Image: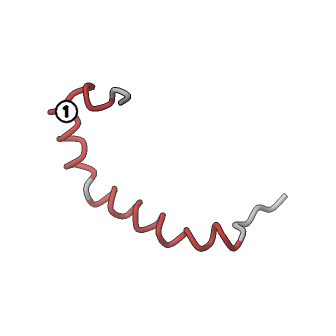
């Protein structure tokens, strides 16, 4: 079986790839912030 994105999904591909790149670029900073803030920031609002 082969899977492929529908045209609507393909339209989001570039945006998602940019988000992944941003997250990779800022990974260390994100981890540092998480360790400083603790789990309080993860609580549901």
Whole-percent x, y for residue 3 in the image: 76, 61
**Residue at 28% across, 60% down:** 25
Foreground residue, 45 or 38? Answer: 45
User: Colour scheme in the image?
Assistant: secondary structure
User: Where 45 sits versus 27, above or below?
Assistant: above
Report the residue at 47% width, 69% height from top.
15
The extreme left residue here reads: 36
Q: Quadrant of the N terminus?
A: bottom right
**Relative image position of residue 2 (x, y in whole percent):** 80, 62
Can you tell which quarter of the image residue 24 is in?
bottom left
In the rendering, at what x and y percent does residue 28 appear? 22, 49
Asked which secondary structure carries label 1, the reply is helix
Q: In which quarter of the image is residue 21?
A: bottom left
Q: Is residue 40 left or right of residue 5?
A: left
- The residue at 24%/41% (across/down) is 31
Q: In this view, does 28 lie to the left or right of 42?
A: left
Q: Which of 16 and 44 is in front in this view?
A: 44
Within 10 Å of disc 1 (Cα), the crowding (few <14, some 14-19, many 20+) is few
Query: Where does the C terminus fall, quadrant-wise?
Result: top left
Tell me what residue is drawn at x 41 percent, y 68 percent.
18
Q: Which residue lies furthest to the right in this view?
A: 1
| Residue placed furthest toward the front | 45
Mark 1 sits on what residue?
35
Which of these two is toward me, 37 or 29? 37
């Amino acid at each position: 079986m082969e899977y492929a994105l529908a045209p609507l999904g393909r339209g989001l591909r570039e945006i998602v790839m940019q988000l992944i790149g941003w997250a990779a670029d800022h990974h260390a900073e994100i981890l540092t912030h998480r360790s400083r803030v603790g789990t309080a920031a993860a609580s549901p609002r």
